[in-house]
Image: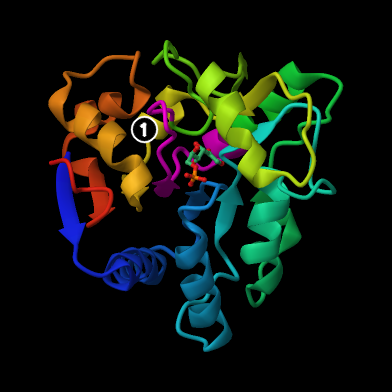
Amino acid sequence: MEKYVFIQTNELVHQIVKEIKELIEKKPTALLCIAGGDTPKPVMEKLVEASQNDEIDFSTCYFVGLDEWVGISKETDGSCYQTLDDYFFSKLKGVKPANICFFNGKATALDQECERINQFINKRQQIDYILLGIGMNGHLGFNEPGAEITKEAHVIELDMTTKQVMGKYFKTALPLEHGITLGLKQILNSGKIVLMATGEHKASMIAKIMNSEPTNQIPATLMKMAGSAVTLYLDQGAAQNL
Ligand code: F6R
């Protein structure tokens, strides 16, 4: 796992945008996955700008959701789908709705929902580029501490830390107990895995990840097993304890 620390957050964002641009030029039908949450929002903004300026053509790309809170979906402010839609999908030029496959956290048959997502990925063999944030407990997507490395999309019980942090996404408290997420197997199988962390509040978890052997108690450490396919991009705040 290569680690890069950027002096300016906008340089970090620029690097990721450049990688995605190069990938799409090489493979116009690339399958992309971008986490919800706050971390990737500046990247989404720059990707939208590049799309609007005709610098990146997303019209033949595919997109798969990383995760969703069980019990809510696109119509709820703060859901992963709404975040992606507001900041990204709805603003891209020429994207085909059929090319976007996102978890519906309100599906009655969640097993079938997982299967639908698995099939969408399997049809394209792998995710070409996955941009992940890192949870305060080291989670990736909703692969919480203890997550199994062999799993594809599945439903999980939210970890205590995730439940404490989730208030920042919602205007009112929601009684959410479960998440639905791509599994570590699908993440590790991606062509390019980018872990992005910004801000001092991530510094102690980043130091823990860097100093730990791969363990599913800190899911982000498992990305060390993906070798050169994985890159960790940090700003100075997130890197301050290294
Ligand atoms: C969100 C997601 C989560 C977040 C992580 C970091 O779709 O999958 O794993 O990426 O919790 O969240 P932020 O970026 O809000 O600090």
User: Vertical placement of 215 versus 54: above or below?
Assistant: above
As rendered, which of 39 and 84 lies closer to the eye? 39
Q: Name the quadrant containing residue 227.
A: top left
Q: Residue 64's spot in the image, x, y percent?
A: 59, 45
Q: Residue 83's spot in the image, x, y percent?
A: 66, 54
Q: Residue 85's spot in the image, x, y percent?
A: 70, 59
User: Vertical placement of 134 versus 12: above or below?
Assistant: above
Q: Is residue 99 visible?
A: no
User: Vertical placement of 65 versus 177: above or below?
Assistant: below
User: Vertical placement of 5 versus 54: above or below?
Assistant: above
As rendered, which of 156 and 23 lies closer to the eye? 156
Q: Residue 40's spot in the image, x, y percent?
A: 47, 56
- Which residue is label 1 attached to? 189
- Local packing at callout 1 (Cα closer than 10 Å; few below 14, some 14-19, many 20+) is some
| Numbered range of the magenta stretch | 120-139
Quadrant into which the C terminus falls? top left
Q: Name the quadrant containing residue 51.
A: bottom right
SS state under label 1: loop
Residue sitting at 45 percent across and 30 percent down?
Answer: 186
Residue sitting at 33 percent across and 29 percent down?
Answer: 220
Amino acid marked by disc 1: Asn
Q: Is residue 119 visible?
A: yes
Quadrant into which the N terminus falls? top left
